[in-house]
Image (cartoon, rainbow, N blue to C red):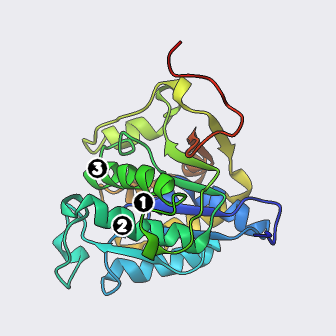
Amino acid sequence: MKRASAVPCLLGVFAHPDDESLLAGGVLAQHAAADARTAVVTATWTANSHRATELTNALAILGAGTPRLLGYADARNPTSAPDGAVRLIDAPLDEAVGRLVAHIREVRPDIVIGHDALGQLTGHPDHRRAHQITLLAVEAAGLPHLYPAAGEPWQPAALYTATHAESGLGRLGPLLQSVGKTLLAVPDAYVTTTVDVSPWATVKWSAILAHRGEVARERSLPGLLARLPEAERTEIIRTECFTRLSPGPSPGDTRRLMA
């Protein structure tokens, strides 16, 4: 399939509205500015919830299309699904993977971006579940015998998991600790890609601000960031870190698992 841009097409897969802006808003804005196709799948908060509207506004700012919702409820917030949808952490794994496979095959991204295995710094159960679902769906999307009703197979070239290195927390660590939150960072060696998104920091911050409900909360990261001086806030949000994972077969790699 011919790309409209030489810059890779991105699909972000995140647990909650605002995760996309906090964890990869700069990269999404960067790719959109280069005329690459970008899109975001959000696992929790249903279309008739107030945060879906905020997500719509944030994605418009980032140039990442319209919301793609898996339709599950947040593990910790019953108002996330006014229609009574099952929580993401309680959803049948095969069902959740199939829903995500359909989006991957429709968008046909070169790269998928998602949560790390730790569930980001606070280890939110929805983040961890989204990571597991994304790992399975990225591989399954390229196999024609899996989820055949979900569209034509498509194998992304790579999965990048948004993460935080132990040595790179900077001001973010004390900021979260000040409200009693845990810090789960990966060893530095796990970070394969660090992106300076300073040119897009203003766009990223505007997208974070679009999640007004979270900005108004005292203990949420958007709320904590909103109360910082601009220079200190920019220092925190201007760097995005990822671990690259390579799904699917590696052509020409004949190395064996055991001698």
Specify which label sits upstream in the sequence, 2 or 3: 3
Dot 1, how many residues are within 10 Å of its Cα: few (below 14), some (14-19), or many (20+)?
Answer: many
Indicate the amino acid at tag 3. Answer: His
Q: Secondary structure at mark 2?
A: helix
Real-space Cα separation, disc 1 to disc 2, in angstroms: 6 Å
Which of the 4 image quadrants contains residue 207? bottom right
Specify which label sits upstream in the sequence, 1 or 2: 2
Task: Give the residue number, with chain letter if any, for mark 3.
Answer: 124
Against 10, is 61 above or below? below
Dot 3, how many residues are within 10 Å of its Cα: few (below 14), some (14-19), or many (20+)?
Answer: some
Residue occupying the far top of the picture: 259
Specify which label sits upstream in the sequence, 1 or 3: 3
Q: Secondary structure at mark 1?
A: helix
Residue 199: image tag: none
Against 191, is 235 above or below? below
Residue 258 visible to the viewer? yes
Q: Position of residue 87 (x, y in %)?
A: 20, 66
Indicate the amino acid at tag 1. Answer: Pro
Q: Residue at x 23, y 78 (%)?
A: 81
- State the count of labels: 3
Q: Quarter of the image for the N terminus: give it.
A: bottom right
Real-space Cα separation, disc 2 to disc 3, in angstroms: 16 Å
